[in-house]
């Protein structure tokens, strides 16, 4: 099963100059809680710009470059083949950005973990494909700076 985890502001902004536009401790804790000991997938740009290494997660980095290597992670050169291979697995693969990876993986995702950041930030990267009409909210937690929601994709009527 494919899911995704993202935080975006009221304009669906997710990034600025290759990093996250905000530093919200509580939000990072939620990300940690949702991804701990799970399979996570991220683009080479996001992975290489992480402020620290993510411990206790099984990380796959996607890069078209066959020479790309990073210590302690799996690398896949074909995101779409990866998504097709795992979309019907019982095991969850959580897409963790960035923009180009979210865009390509969005149609495959059945579940989502989203932090809706309340304040507007200066951004240059967006999660533009997200449409709230695609999702049912199954859980919600309110924090000072964001609302966290767990969502499941609506079934398409036959
Ligand atoms: N707010 C959030 O929750 C959140 C989460 C994550 C990231 N972000 C933000 O998102 C921004 C980065 O997004 P981005 O779109 O620039 O970069 P990205 O999605 O992290 O990575 C892009 C790279 O992924 C590889 N790639 C893309 N499509 C592929 C495919 N079909 N098969 C194999 N590899 C593929 C390519 O790597 P190669 O060039 O090596 O081939 C491409 O350059 C940053 O600002 C980051 O902070 C925000």
Image (spheres, rainbow, N blue to C red):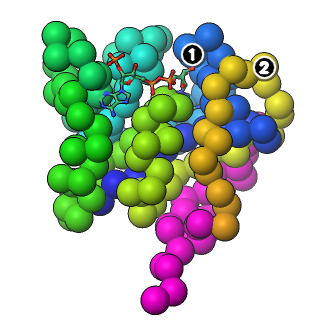
**Pick the front one: 154 or 107:** 107
The verdict on label 1 being within 8 Å of ligand 1 is: yes
Magenta extent:
134-158
| Position in image of residue 18 (x %, y %) | 55, 14
Q: Residues within 10 Å of mark 2 (few under 14, many from 20)?
A: some
Q: Main secondary structure of the magenta part?
A: strand
Between disc 1 and disc 2, whose residue precedes?
Answer: 1
Q: Is residue 108 above or below residue 128?
A: below
Residue that lies at the very extreme toward the bottom in this rendered image: 158
Residue 72 covered by magenta stretch: no
Mark on residue 64? none
Residue 54 appearing in the image: yes
Q: Residues within 10 Å of mark 1 (few under 14, many from 20)?
A: some
User: Residue 151 is drawn in which quadrant?
Assistant: bottom right
SS at mark 2 in the image: loop
Residue 151 covered by magenta stretch: yes
Quadrant location of ligand 1?
Answer: top left
User: Residue 66 is drawn in which quadrant?
Assistant: top left
| Position in image of residue 52 (x %, y %) | 41, 13
Residue that lies at the very extreme toward the right in this rendered image: 119
Q: Quadrant of the N terminus?
A: bottom left
Residue 38 appearing in the image: no
Distance Cα–Cα, label 1 vs label 2: 12 Å
Mark on residue 19? 1
Mark on residue 122? 2
Q: Is residue 101 left or right of residue 120?
A: left
Residue drawn at point x = 52 percent, y = 51 percent: 113
Q: Is residue 141 left or right of residue 90?
A: right
| Position in image of residue 86 (x %, y %) | 21, 54
Q: Is residue 114 above or below residue 89?
A: above
């Amino acid at each position: 099963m494919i899911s995704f985890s993202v935080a975006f502001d009221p304009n669906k902004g997710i990034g600025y100059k290759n990093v996250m536009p905000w530093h919200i401790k509580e939000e990072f804790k939620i990300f940690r809680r949702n991804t701990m000991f799970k399979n996570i997938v991220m683009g080479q740009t996001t992975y290489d710009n992480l402020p620290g290494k993510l411990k206790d997660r099984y990380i796959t980095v996607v890069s078209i470059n066959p020479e790309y290597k990073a210590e302690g992670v799996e690398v896949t050169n074909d995101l779409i083949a990866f998504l097709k291979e795992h979309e019907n697995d019982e095991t969850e693969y959580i897409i963790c950005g960035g923009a180009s990876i979210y865009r390509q993986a969005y149609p495959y995702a059945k579940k989502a973990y989203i932090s809706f950041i309340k304040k507007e930030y200066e951004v240059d990267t967006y999660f533009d494909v997200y449409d709230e009409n695609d999702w049912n909210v199954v859980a919600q937690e309110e924090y000072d700076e964001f609302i966290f929601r767990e969502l499941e994709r609506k079934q398409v009527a036959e």
